[in-house]
Image (cartoon, grey):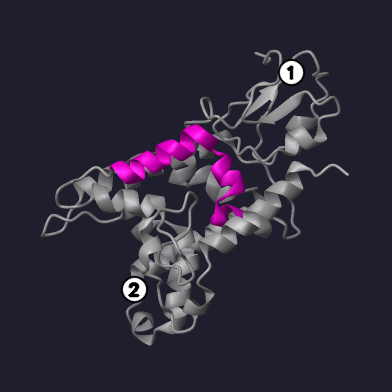
Amino acid sequence: MKITYAIKRKLLQFIAFGCSNAHLLNFKGGKIYTGKWKQFCNPGLNCYSCPAAGFACPIGALQAVNGSRQFSFSFYVTGLLLAFGVLLGRAVCGWLCPFGLLQELIHKIPSPKRKLKKGFLYIKYVVLVVFVLILPVAVTDYIGMGKPAFCQYICPAGTLEGGLFLLAAHESLRKAIGALFSLKMAILVLTLIGCVFFYRFFCRTLCPLGAIYGLFNKISMFHLEVDSHRCVGCGKCKTVCGMEVDPVKTPDSAECIRCGACVDVCPTDALYLGFSTKCKKNLP
């Protein structure tokens, strides 16, 4: 029996989720793991403040170094993002991101499923530029330290994985709840509702990490190819794509998370997903 990409991917997603959140005992008492592994970044989006998290969040780390008093440029964080981008592109989102898995599970809730208007796809690039790159540098406190604006004002993953669990464990934090937390809760609720109706709603509209990895899809080593000699133009690949990409016309789309769903349904094996080059010629 052929093992489909759907099975392979889901298995790896759960493994990645478990490895990213291995410190389950920290939920008791609301502790945050601060061991040596926390100096390394998770390739996908997973909140640093989640009690179970064993690694740092790359977006949080990028903001932290951008907003330091020396305005230092973190070669480690940037190098990590470049490495994963060149190697995997947005396959990181599809195969390794813990919050991506949560969105997919939420989307399985029975409901009418909707298509997302293309204009919403560009919001994540605005979020990346404004909240991750500009504000941590431009807006600083009295000692010259910038704030992690995306984490502080937007990130629903942080609210869900870190904020709610820490609030449940610490009464002092619950007493300090203010308007900012209410704003973040509203964003989280809207995100979760969006994920019910739209496939990977946060990934496609707000995630700055997805925006970064998407820029590498055209050059990533792990890529999607179309064999023009085999393709019969049936359109099944486009119909099955949750990210609303046409794999035949735009196999290198920045929205493609390399999930392999299109490869699984292709009746003529005209699509290839992997590191090597197998197809004779890509369709224009």
- Tell me if 31 is positioned left or right of 256 in this view: left
Position above or below: 264 against 102: above
Q: Which residue is mark 1?
A: 227
Q: Is residue 103 visible?
A: no
The C terminus, quarter of image: top right
Q: Read off the magenta span.
A: 75-103
Q: Residue at x 74, y 56 (%)?
A: 111
Q: Dividing the picture into quarters, in which one does residue 258 lie?
A: top right
Q: What's the amino acid at mark 1?
A: Asp
Position above or below: 258 against 197: above
Position above or below: 235 against 92: above
Q: Residues within 10 Å of mark 1 (few under 14, many from 20)?
A: some
Discs 1/2, front: 1
Asked if the magenta segment contains residue 92, the reply would be: yes
x%, y% of residue 11?
Answer: 69, 54
x%, y% of residue 273?
Answer: 68, 31
Work out how far the residue at label 1 is from the one at label 2, CA to CA, in angstroms.
Answer: 56 Å
Q: What's the amino acid at mark 2?
A: Gly
